[in-house]
Image: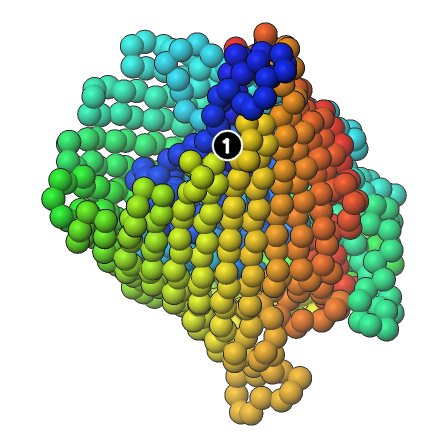
Amino acid sequence: MQENRARSVCKLAVAVALAGSVGPVCAQTIEELVVTAEKRESSAQTTAISMKVVGDEELANAGVTELASITNIAPTVNVAQNNDNTLITIRGVSSRDYTETGDPAVAVNIDNFYFQDSLGLNAALFDVQRIEVLRGPQGTLYGRNATAGALNITTNKPGQELAGKVAVEFGDYGTRKGEGAVDVPLAQNLSLRLAGMIKQSDGYRDNGAGGHGDEDDSKGFRAHLAWDATDRFSALLTYELVDIGGVGAAPKGVLYEQVNSDGTLQLGDDLEWQLNREGERDIEQESLRVALNYDFDALSIIYSGGVRNQDYLRSNDQDGGTLLDYSWVQDGESTAQNHEVRFISDFDGMVNFQAGAFYFKNDGDKSNAYFRLYGLLPDNAPYDFYTFLYQTENESSAVFGQLSFQLTDDLEYEIGARYTKDKKAQTGMFDQGAGYLTDLDYAYDGSKVTWHTGVNWDVSDDLFLYAKIDRGYKAGGFKNDAEYNPEEITAYEVGSKSQFMDNTLQLNSSLYYYDYTDLQVLQTDPVSGVARTYNAGAATIYGAELEMLFLPTEYDSIDVSLAYVSAEYDEFCTVTAGSCPAESDFSGNKLPQAPEISAILGYSHDFPLASGMITARLQTRFQDESYFTFNNRKTEWQDAYTKTDVLLTYRSDELPISVTGYVRNLENEAILTMSEEAGYMGGYLVQYAAPRMYGLRMDYEF
């Protein structure tokens, strides 16, 4: 991506260029990026984390308006969609359990507020300043459920002057988007930022009686109130409301007999298939967050926390066709809160530290109903196929600390640890119909220590090297009637970050090796559809990453991201007692969503005009073949693909406007986001990413 690119072409340079002068007048260099990946401000090029950082303009260019499209900017990141649940994989490490008792492998934080629930994470992002994708376990500063890494989303905060922006976008499939934000100074050192968005589309899929799958009707509002009370104390109060409506995802059913001789599915048309009924989703998320910061010169105390309420009603045609008329309805609500206090030093001496405490709690109440088994029950049948009614409680607390020792002017040693205590509980009822009731009463109580150690070397102003070892973990728990243990990952990594050629060429690289034990693997009973989580014995993951940004001229930018991942199970038998029969031994299989080769290549060129600038950008992503489940069957497989986006942007010198035309997925690839066996409907269920899309976006700033 071109996230570091300095768009510093001055009007004089443009005028001279138009007059026929050779060579640029204004030099262009790669800008320094300031990040908060280590929960304190630092330069991205001197932070010992393999990361991808992208600003607001580049997010718009890459089409990242939702978390599902984060793959457009980071090659080792893969996102799967299961209904409205967002399942993120980084370097082959993932979690398939998106329920209240399950835990993600990627810690998602919005303005330092932790989001545990994957439901609704794919809501439209709006008024975002930057996104930081942190690769590798972040078990010390971020804690549990960051075995794969972390995703930090930072929104724009209030400014001290009256200013704002408005953007509208129109595209095919009836796509309409609107976004706006305004900064309002209320008093000296007190300012307000209001931001909102609306996103609507008619849906990519034509499902006959089932309406239009992927139809969207989402809205969002956010208010930041910032108070810089003194030079030392500041406070930020945030209110956020997001409403996600429309039909949502529409699974497609593929019957067992629709399998090719090579084991792949006969997918047929990816835009049109028949369903019995139209899906529905109504998800409302309301958040109130607070951030407080007090600076004692060499010591800062920071509090961040808040509460998030969520109500949802979802349904869809669960057999993906018209043969069986099997449907699913989910209704629930949840309340999540998390609080963190951190102490950060900035001493002149050899030693500095970061220490703190964290608390998280999530309470939920949900019902899952599966209707009309195989279409044999009449509409007025007195019972469903089966229904889950339950309440859950998920609680976690932690203390952590990290020390840094400045051994020399150029050499730093870091060591840190975190102690986490986890509690989970679920009570309720499993109704199998016709009077067959089973009580649900499960509990989990566990703790774990994670740690970090590493060495950082500032070789020169243009070269930074690091080597580190990190331990991460994901909490244990239960899934229906099956208990499982925590999973652990020990990650060894070395990396370099460098600039050359007067800071017009940037090269970052990393090598890593993961020792992964007791992996939590979700296994769905293909007959009943009931899922359980088990522990696989062990897996090994290793790989390499290379990222380059090059500004060969004043008007050109080339960015390349390459990634190689090898991720396989060393020990994995689904039979826990006695010997392991061959059909139950998955040792040697690849981990889900872990393509060996991934790459992103982008090229941008600026065409200076008398009245402004036209920028053309071409970006393509290649992803190797990968599997959606541990079975490694071709029926649950995504073939290798290439996806290309083309953009053309005009920016005016006279007016604060820009206009962008785009085509995304130029090849019109049919890309799967899910494929899994569903024996209850006699085959497999698949979901698709967006097809080829074109549109026009207009931005105005004031």
* Picture layout, residue 86 above or below residue 293: below
Disc 1 is placed on an element classified as loop
**Label 1, on which residue?**
5
Q: Is residue 674 visible?
A: yes
In the image, 20 versus 594, the foreground residue is: 20
Q: Locate residue 396, reporting x and y percent.
A: 35, 54
In the image, 565 versus 214, the foreground residue is: 565
Answer left or right for 119 relative to 478: right
Q: Residue at x 30, y 50 (%)?
A: 459
Q: Is residue 333 visible?
A: no
* Picture layout, residue 363 above or below residue 91: above
Q: Residue at x 59, y 78 (%)?
A: 588
Q: Locate residue 148, reporting x and y percent.
A: 47, 57
In the image, 385 versus 327, the foreground residue is: 327
Answer left or right for 263 relative to 630: right
* Picture layout, residue 176 above or below residue 456: above
In the image, 338 versus 540, the foreground residue is: 540
Q: Could you classify mark 1 by the number of other residues whose Cα lies within 10 Å: few (under 14), some (14-19), or many (20 or more)?
A: many
To which quarter of the image does residue 461 belong?
A: top left
What's the residue type where badge 1 is placed?
Arg
To which quarter of the image does residue 156 belong?
A: top left
Q: Which residue is drawn at 88% across and 43% down?
A: 208
Q: Locate residue 696, reporting x and y percent.
A: 72, 24
* Picture layout, residue 352 above or below residue 308: below
